[in-house]
Amino acid sequence: MSAFHCKSASISCLPKKRDKVKVFYQSSLFIWFFGFALFALSGCYSEKKGEAEHNNVSFYDDNLDVLETRSIMRGTTINPSNIRSGSWYKAGENASTTSHQLRGDVNFYASPSVFEINDESGLKEVNATCGTTSKHILLNDIALTSEWKPLCSAAADKRFVGILNGNARKITGLQIDSDENYIGLFKYIGAYGVVKNLGVIIANDKEINGSQYVGAIAGYIDGGLVENSYAEGNVSGAYGYIGGIAGYVNVGSIKRSYSEGNVSGSGSGIGGLVGRLEGSSIADSYSKGYIAGYGDNNQMVGGIAGQAYGGGGSIKRSYSEGNVSGAQRIGGIAGYIDGATIENVYSVGDVDGNNSVGGIAGYVNVGSIRYSYSEGNVSGDGNVSGIVGYIYSGAISNNAAINEKITGNADVNRIVGNRNSGTVDNNFALETMIVVGSGANGNAGTNKPQAQLKTREAYENATNNNGLGWKFGNDDESPWVWGAFSGYPYPTLYWQTKSLSRY
């Protein structure tokens, strides 16, 4: 406004007539410049305004998976069924929406009574729906402002059995310090409960700490699913079943998810993703962090799962990148396997323990490990090896131990430290591997020079052609790829090239 005042004063208070032309010229020049600036700004404004005049209209199916998103002019009155056939609902409406004037982004759902979560208070309101097949979707990132009290409970009628779609948003600032059981964003996810597309980030310099059944997303999952989700930050517990994603998973699954943070605790069942996996599966996932069990009696510690039990239990197409340590039954992927299957996995961190220590698994009671490799150093006292520390009964085949060094006292070998029974067939071991300690009834594997183990042919060629018979491709059945990450000379998994970096 000062420019206008100055100009007005100079026009009304001219002392001399000869200055009129000069003042007129200066005034005209200023007006022309100001007008040009307004024109230019109006052009920029119009462009931005044009962008703002469109809103996103999204449609979600019964499982809260997005079907379609369209950009439509603001102010337009639309009938959702004219864009997609069928009846569609807005959050908070129990009747079919026949028309809607766009005044902002809007979501339409195939089911009524979908709860849209915009802030911390809205997230806490999930508690009001525990025990029901409710549906929730995040519309914003949510920053928690105080110590979190886990959602729902272990009571049969108060478990989370609905759907929470994080919608590619994240919850930050999560912190819990408790001496109770069932600790995480959720206490307990029950049958058919789903958490997907969600990031959970633990507060800086804090952790999630509980007694037993502790995980960043859930303390306990019983028949539920965590998919396309991740946790970042440290998790600890006092008495076992501690995991980066969930403490205990029973007849459930973890898919396309990861944990980046340290996981530690005492007792049994400490894992990078899950403390104990029972009749459940982990697929296309990874863990990156230091996984540690504390105390002389600590056992069953693994880079992915501390324990993996049968009834269809499996860990597939996954990897662990952090170091793993504990007392007994310690593995780069799983500490203890009983009736479960591990295949198409790899571990690159160092593994250290006292008894039954392996680059992939510490102890196999009944189960199988196939098409997998371990790269880190392995050390312990007894029953130590590059793939499995001890086998009571099981099948170990078509694996590669690429470890530079295996260290122990008794029962030390390259593929299997020691075994009671079971089969150990067609495994490769690095020719220059340093093995410190005495061997036992284990298995050393076939010598392979490092140069050969750094070629695709060593893994892909069929077993009758001096190879391991791994399948290279671009899907779940052929999950391995070669040379996807510069400088990394060993196989990686196909999904890593689509969604994640190697390091």
Image: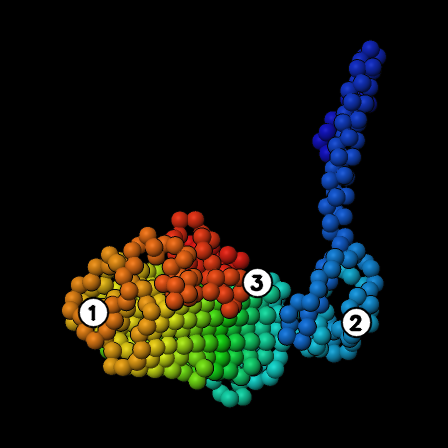
Pinpoint residue 51: horizontal percent, then vertical percent.
Answer: 73, 49
**Viewer-proximal residue, 458 or 132?**
458
Circle on res. 412: 1
- Circle 3 is placed at which residue position? 169
Task: Residue 431: name its quadrant.
Answer: bottom left
Q: Quadrant of the C terminus?
A: bottom left
Q: Give the residue at x 73% y 29%.
A: 3
- Circle 2 is placed at which residue position? 85
Q: Quadrant of the N terminus?
A: top right
Q: Is residue 67 above or below residue 183?
A: above
Can residue 111 be spotted in the picture?
yes
Q: Is residue 36 above or below residue 214?
A: above
Pinpoint residue 329: horizontal percent, then vertical percent.
Answer: 28, 75
Residue at the outermost bottom position? 156
Q: Tell me the kind of residue under disc 3.
A: Arg
**Viewer-proximal residue, 228 or 459?**
459
Q: Give the residue at x 39% y 63%.
A: 465
Colour theme: rainbow
Q: Give the residue at x 82% y 19%.
A: 24
Q: Is residue 467 left or right of residue 44?
A: left
Q: Is residue 488 above or below residue 471?
A: above
Q: Of the residues under marks 2 and 3, which one precedes in the sequence?
A: 2
Spatial separation of the CA atoms under disc 2 and disc 3: 28 Å
